[in-house]
Image: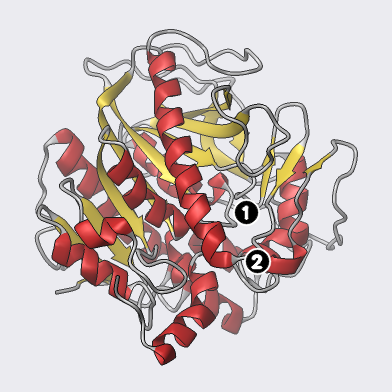
Amino acid sequence: MTKAQPSESRARRKRGLRAVAVCAALLTNLLITVLPAQAAPSRVPAAHPARMRLPVPTGRFHVGEVTLHLADTSRRDPWHPGKDDRELMVSVYYPTTRTADRPAAPYMLPRAAAHFDSVTANDYLGMDLPTGRADWAATVTHAAQGAPVAHGDRKRPVLLYSPGLGEPRTWGTTSAADLASRGYVVVTIDNTYESPEVQFPDGSLATMVTPDDPDAFIRKALTVRDADTSFVLDQLGWVNSGRNPDVDGRSLPHGLAGALDLSRVGMFGHSLGGTATATAMDADPRIRAGINMDGNLTHYDGTLMPVAERGLARPLLLMGKDGATDTGPGWAAFRAHTPGWTRQLRLRGAEHASFTDAEALLPQLDLPPGTLTRDIGTIAPATAVRTNEAYVSAFFDHWLRGTHDHLLDGPSPRYPAMEFVE
């Protein structure tokens, strides 16, 4: 395997944890527990915490949403062996045409929001966000809870979203809702004990485990995510056949059964979620196409991951931030070893978090300019959001729907911020 030179290795170690949303504070401050429902974390109040707005989806459909509580009874939880089953929470976004009398889905549930506000942004994501500045619980999405699935002559392609390590599944809501408005069914996955917090229907909160050895932790996390991804796909098969896999028996939206085309499955993710997209594609042939948003394909110790050493026979798009990055060696190896289609794009002026909801939400918090520049770069937020949406949708439209608008053929004057890397 290829080893980094000592100076490169030191630089990668310095940058690496931030690149997968793990910082030094995370090694000592994270919890290995499920918080009881009555023990909410403390929160420093602000005079007027902001109720933020997410970008409006650009497709022709309104968006519906439902959450599912899933349990894999075939394996114990790898992070918490005392639990007999591996339990996950996922959100399903889908096109709808009827939203009347349906409440807007919350961005975060109350206890998850309180935990995110009190520790997550600083200890997990490495962002310097004042506690109590944002009202995460009062922020709502553009998705209607439980709305019926829009009628269609054909089944709809399915996309899976994997968040970065230390990021909740909600951190990709903008992309998920926009793709659903374009006719996709999008499933965002919280990988329990890797997500900063996961609130279950009974009110309990599972928080992230402490990575004593970052390299071993990330290797294990990718193995767990591969298994979680395949399990979620299995459960979607149940949903499509008319069975309800929700542990708590909550109703599924009308029309969801039979609406999924599980022969057209794609996946995308940010940071470690982008890495997991590549490894899950390598492990599960049901995933036909994927997008890696700024996720390494080298291990924390600098060695290449197997998927970088042998490439993929199915299309994977690499979307990266601007400036210095530690994704280079793994991405270069992957491109050299991939026999089929692949592209590498660079979003000019972007930072690592520019591919997440941070790009749209942080500017609403009246933060110091230096904080915003460090976290989401110098690109205009609206430009970043719409450029990302255009290329993500063009990729999946081409590989899962067979349409081709030539956006991925080369630079476009419509989106000058997106650079093609040779």
Residue 83 falls in which quadrant of the image?
Answer: top right
Residue at x-position 42% and y-position 43%: 161
Locate the N terminus and report the quarter of the image it occupies.
bottom left
At a point 40% along the width and 12% down the height, the residue shown is 257
Report the residue that reaches farthest toward the front.
1
Q: What residue type is labelled 1?
A: Met
* Disc 1 and disc 2 in contact, CB within 8 angstroms: yes
Question: Which residue: 39% across, 28% down?
Answer: 233
Please tell me which residue lies in front, 3 or 311.
Answer: 3
Say the numbered circle drawn on residue 365.
Answer: 2
Which SS class for mark 1?
loop
Tell me the residue that label 1 is attached to.
Answer: 52
Q: Is 61 on the left-hand or right-hand side of 245? A: left
Residue 214, given in percent of the width and then of the height, sits at 57, 66
Residue 116: percent from the left, percent from the top? Answer: 71, 54
Q: Is residue 256 visible?
A: no
10 Å crowding of disc 1: few (<14), some (14-19), many (20+)? many
Q: Which amino acid does label 2 sit on?
A: Leu
Frontmost residue, 37 versus 149: 37
Instruction: Assign a secondary structure to mark 2.
Output: helix
Q: In which quarter of the image is the C terminus?
A: bottom left
